[in-house]
Image (cartoon, grey):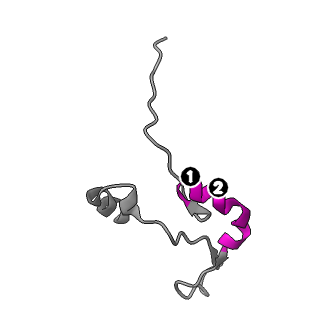
Amino acid sequence: MRSRRVVITGMAVVSVLGTGIKGFWEGLPAICLSIVQINQFNANAFYNQISGDINDFKPEAFMDHDETMVSSSL
């Protein structure tokens, strides 16, 4: 059996708790505060009316402009 090599070039987290490894770990104690009622639009027509918003996420910090445009159009 042939062995495979793996290279990890970086780690990142994008979560309601925080963006980046440091922000995520700092946000863990506030996990209950991260889930709130939807306030970006009227969600009365939906069964679920809670969400975990990611307010501080800036895709440009993690990928170049071309990748950002592709991922936002999915």
Residue 26 colored in magenta in the image: yes
Residue at image mark 2? 25
Image quadrant where residue 24 sits = bottom right
**Label 1 close to label 2 by CB (< 8 Å):** yes
Does residue 21 sit above or below 68 in this rendering? above
Q: Secondary structure at mark 2?
A: helix
Is residue 74 visible in the rendered image? The answer is: no
Horizontal side of residue 56 vs 37, given as left or right: left
Is residue 67 visible in the rendered image? The answer is: yes
Residue at image mark 1? 21
**Viewer-closest of 12 and 44:** 12
Image quadrant where residue 53 sits = bottom right
Count of numbered labels shown in the rendering: 2
**Viewer-closest of 70 and 7:** 7
Q: Residue at x 52, y 86 (%)?
A: 41
Instruction: Specify start and end residues of the magenta stretch as a single range.
Output: 19-35
Q: Residue at x 36, y 65 (%)?
A: 72
Locate residue 5, reporting x and y percent.
45, 23
Does residue 19 sit above or below 2 in this rendering? below
Locate residue 70, reporting x and y percent.
31, 59
Q: Residue at x 66, y 70 (%)?
A: 34
Q: Residue at x 50, y 50 (%)?
A: 12
